[in-house]
Image (cartoon, rainbow, N blue to C red):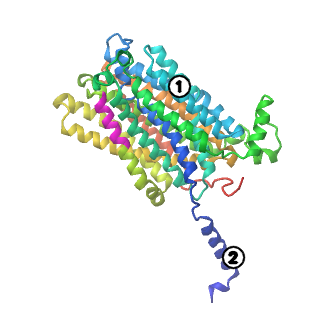
Amino acid sequence: MNLNDNPTIDEGTALLAHTKKQCKPTPLPKVQIGILLLFHFCEPITGHSISPYINQLVSELDITGGDERKVGYYAGLIQSLFYFTEAIMVMQWSRISDHVGRKPVLLIGLVGTSASVLLFGLSRTFWALVFSRCLCGLLNGNVGVMKSAMGELTNSSNRAQGFSLIPIVGAIGATLGPLVGGTFARPHERFPQVFGGKFWQDYPYFLPCLVTSSYVCVSIIVGLLFLKETVPKWIRDRGRSSLASGGVTPVGSSPVLSHDGPLPLRDVLVYPVIISISNYMALAFLSIMLSALLPLFFTMPIHIGGLGFKPSTIGYIMGSYGASTGVFQALFFARTVRRFGERHTFLRGIMSFMPIFLLFPVMSTIAQRSGVNLVVWLCIVMLVSLMILVDMAFGCIFIYVTASSPNRHSLGATNGLSQMGVSFARALGPALATSLFSFSVEKNMLGGYAVYVVLSCISCLVMFLAVRLPEKVWEGKDDDNSD
């Protein structure tokens, strides 16, 4: 019997053909996505630029009483304050962007970043550093808003391609940030012919802050001139009217309005959103602890469990890592996701944390016995390679979070919730990791290596949460709706 005569098969065949047609990738709006990535680059380059010298800066402030073992407490606190204050406001900025548009909120965040970075470079006391980092966090909700705009510029057919660019840009920022910080810190010592004046001696860390702040200013100008708004005008008009009357969309709004516009917050908290955000928080928590611990480990003298590297050496190592992960993401992320899927790629990243944390005591033990030799450098190469696998997990979880949104116009709330949770995790992470390091060394717990045992155990526990992600990403809402 000819199968083509079967009406059921004909109907099924037509449906499958339609599905394949729908799955054809939509071309990305390259200019607009390029501007968003330009904005996204501001946070990693400003944040990572302080990592090569933050521990040395804390030592020079004389708040540790000359005890280098206490540097970790204060360095971790400074790094955590940005994320803690960001967590307080990021949800508010994201909800505002749902109602008044992404562009004004993004530009406000960039202005806050530029001003606070300059203040950081001009700070000569511990509390001035605290104020500058808090100001940056309070005015900056850009990461969540940028991801919302990215979700609105893409659909289910090209979202993986679009979101794969975010970790690449982060990697470039992680490359150039430490290089800028390590190269231009204390310029009166490195470039005395040009920066030998008294100002540069009084403010030895202002130059890297000036360089990164200048980039942010350029991004502001580009955004003002060329960035297009992604939130429909009718939603912005209704949102401005609601905000002008003293509130946002009423909780009791009609079902039709709630469906067509941003949903109330309680309606956003569905299972896909909760499980995606939980995994994003866990990944960010482990990653930020690693990011805070690594420069501290590189900076501390060998006899107290570190490797005793100079800021310039740390900058080159972190820069090499950023360049390597950027190239790897660009060449292999999309291929890896297509072959293994988002869930499998994410699980690989989470599984990489345990061997990463276990490499720290190995390197320290070798350095104490034989100095920083070839074996230590091979361990550093291995550690950087594993960190590249971790970075691939971020692209995957971005896709899960965006696809979990109940509707297209609630992307700001969804990403705001995720960024708020992640900011709290990142606020806790640096202080916890660096304090554990200092506590382990001070009390000589497990030979000073207790911090790595604790972090390895946490990475194992996160696996139980990671396996709850579905094999297939949820279907995006309203992907084909035109605004």
Q: What is the total number of numbered labels drawn onto the structure image?
A: 2
Q: Residue at point 28% right, 32% down?
A: 313
Quarter of the image for residue 197 reads top left
Q: Where does the image place residue 83, in percent across and percent down from the top left?
A: 52, 28
Q: Which portion, as a residue range, is magenta?
A: 311-322
Q: Where does the image place residue 142, in percent across and percent down from the top left?
A: 57, 36
| Identity of the residue furthest to the left in this view | 370
Taking 180 as reference, is 31 left or right? right
Q: Residue at point 44% right, 58% down?
A: 335
Does the magenta segment cover residue 319? yes
Q: Where does the image place residue 167, in percent across and percent down from the top left?
A: 46, 45
Residue nearest the viewer, comparing 62 with 306:
62
| Identity of the residue furthest to the front in this view | 193
Residue wearing tag 2? 11
Does the magenta segment cover residue 314? yes
Residue nearest the viewer, comparing 337 with 226:
226
Marker disc for residue 25: none
Quarter of the image for residue 25 reads bottom right
Q: Residue at point 60% right, 45% down?
A: 226
Could you tell me how far apart the alpha carbons at marks 2 and 1 are, in whole angstroms? 62 Å
The quadrant of the image that shows the N terminus is bottom right
Mark 2 crowdedness (10 Å alpha carbons): few <14, some 14-19, many ≥20: few
Taking 327 as reference, is 104 left or right? right
Residue wearing tag 1? 115
Please name the amino acid that badge 2 sits on.
Answer: Glu
Which mark's residue is nearer the viewer, 2 or 1? 1
Residue nearest the viewer, comparing 179 with 131:
179
